[in-house]
Amino acid sequence: MNIAVCVKHVPDPNLPMEMDGTRLKRAGVQGVLDPGDEFGVESALQVKEGFGAEVTLVSMGPEASSEALRRGLSMGADRAILVSDDALEGADALATARVLHRAIDRAQPDLVVAAVESTDGYTGTMPAALAQLMGWPQVTFATQVEITDRTLRAHRQTATGYHLVECELPLVVTVTAGINEPRYASFKGIMAAKKKPLERLALADLGLSPDEVRPAQEIVELSKAEERRSGEVIVDEGDAASRVAAFLREAKVI
């Protein structure tokens, strides 16, 4: 079994985000493997340990993205693919899905694992676009995953609990934070990661042209979010219940 895991190098979400015009500043800032992607890597590694699978990490971004890939390799992934091209600067979710689709095809996976969303974009649309391009079904918001033979069984998180979903491979699955506890990279793993294959590709290597990955959307303006206003304090002078009810009616809650 071959497993591909989509990973991303993002500005450290524990640090204040900086903007470069209408884009998130990436050059010269501390970057890390997206914390959400660590759960995806761990999920793939657990399947690897149960089935003897090969795990390939796939990413798109500048050369600095290799740091995130090395992190995943040090956790136990077998190989990595990085697509880096100047024409990809400012790519949107659809362009990213097109690029990852071509790169993932090289790994010939039976299963693609991704996080629900990235911590720098939060659109949550890339995995769905990827599944559509691959022509594969998608299982989303998985909080628990089991694979038996060629069938994936997942607990899919919902607002009221979870759905139990079964689907035959191949497929794309997105996993939530909390599905597992990502392992720490050991010193042995860190040293071994330096020798694992990391294939670097450009758009031409994937048979894509700059026009095919040109962003279909443009950010024209940014504005600060409105500061949260302090709540209203109601002092009970015998009429608190009616005042609360009036407030809820005004808010159209009741």
Image (tube, grey):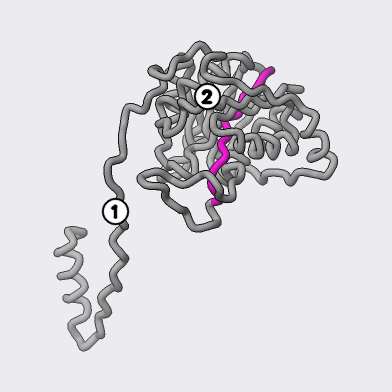
Q: Earlier in the sequence, mark 2 or mark 1?
A: 2
Q: In the rendered view, does 228 fall on the left or right side of 253?
A: right
Q: Position of residue 218 (x, y in %)?
A: 31, 35
Viewer-side residue, 128 vs 221: 221
**Residue 223, disc:** 1
Q: Residue furthest top?
A: 207
Q: Quadrant of the N terminus?
A: top right
* Circle 2: residue type: Val
**Front one among 151 and 201:** 201
Task: Please name the residue shown 82% across and 38% down the image.
Answer: 191
Range shown magenta: 1-12
The span from disc 2 to disc 1 (Cα, nearest Å) is 35 Å
Q: Secondary structure at mark 2?
A: strand
Q: Residue at x 42, y 34 (%)?
A: 90
Q: Is residue 177 above or below residue 199?
A: below
Report the disc number at residue 254: none
Residue 70: name its quadrant. Answer: top right
- Please name the residue that numbered disc 2 is placed on: 172
Quarter holding the C terminus is bottom left
Within the image, what quadrant is residue 23 found in? top left
Residue closest to the far right: 188
At a point 65% along the width and 34% down the height, the residue shown is 66
Residue at the image position 38 percent from the left and 24 percent from the top: 214
Q: Secondary structure at mark 1?
A: loop
Q: Nearer the viewer, mark 2 or mark 1?
A: 1
Dividing the picture into quadrants, the one containing residue 63 is top right
* Residue 6 part of the magenta-drawn span: yes
Q: Amino acid type of disc 1?
A: Ser
